[in-house]
Amino acid sequence: MNRSPAAPDPYAILREWLSGAYVRPDGQEVRGRAWDEDTRYRYGLLLGGFQAPPAWRQDWFGYIGDLVWHFEARDVREWAGGLTNLDGSPLAASSRGRAVSAVRSFYTHCAEDLGASRWHLPPRRALAGPTPPVNSERMTRFQTDALRTAADRYRGPHPERARLAVYTTLAGLRPGQSIALVVEHIQRDNAAGPTWRLPAKNNSSSAVTGFQPVPRPVVWALDEYMPVRTHKAPHSTAETGPLLVSRTGRGLDRVTFPRIIRDVAAGHPDLEEVAPSLLPDVIAHSPSPFAEEQAPGGR
């Protein structure tokens, strides 16, 4: 992006804002809000392309270029309307709304906390269009059974990890919960059977539920995955760190996780049509094929 030397650097402002600390024009250092990891990643990706996968070319700063401080509301509307998933499918209305919120929040910060010119942006709904109720879609029980079969038969990269990722989603875990699962919160030595503490559904990595039984099929998937889990210090070890990890030992991110789910689904003939746009959230809110299968020792 080409900028005048006198213009503030939006990337630098974004980094400071997301770090939770920034300097006001009068030189005062300010401790800002404590961002959760999910929001920090999403805002960084949408606004500045931070930690973007190779195919990503849709961040706001890259789109608006020299007009980053001189844009119109229609520019935000056109940008949000053209956003797509990595597979080229149009972004869902709710995701467009979150993208617009990121832009509005950034410029609100610039206006209120950095003394920059004010931008009179319309409400999110006017820029992104109406957002439908979250999780209105559902898969049928026939489709979730097919997805389970696809996971059992999957022979692509890291099949044990892919199977466990699908199984945790079929068990009702939201994608953020599956990604945030840590090995330390899985107990295998209980007389009543394995239990786990699940991350709460509020995007906070520090908030977890109480111990609850692990569905029996997930236990089987765990038993196959743990011996081949690619843990690597300092990000993870055999007994600590994220459960679902990449080849570098880091936890999976929110781009890789749905891609794994879609790759698995594409292997089943009854899911080929829905696989390219399948969302883990939709699966998690669909009838689970594990509903009638008790955890070991469970009531």
Image: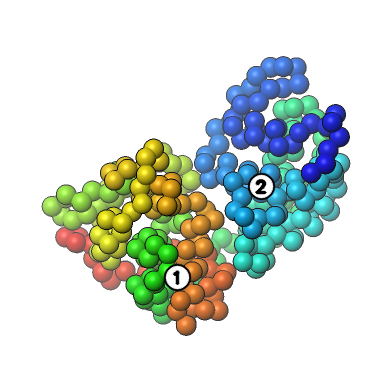
Tell me the SS state at disc 1. helix
Give the vertical position of 236 relative to 153 (above or below).
Answer: above
> Which amino acid is tagged 1?
Val
**x 72%, y 45%: residue:** 103
Give the vertical position of 263 relative to 58 (above or below).
Answer: below
Outermost bottom residue = 269
| N-term mark: 1 or 2 | 2
Give the camera-side residue of 226 and 208.
226
Disc number for residue 152 = none
Give the vertical position of 182 relative to 108 (above or below).
Answer: below
Residue 169: x and y in percent read 41, 62
**x 45%, y 57%: residue:** 174
Residue topped by disc 1: 264
Outermost top residue = 27
Residue 14: x and y in percent read 68, 36
Q: Quadrant of the N terminus?
A: top right
Tell me the SS state at disc 2. loop
> Which amino acid is tagged 2?
Gly
Direction from residue 229 to residue 176 in the image, left or right: right
Whether residue 103 is visible, yes or no, is yes
**x 71%, y 37%: residue:** 11
Residue topped by disc 2: 49
Outermost left residue = 191
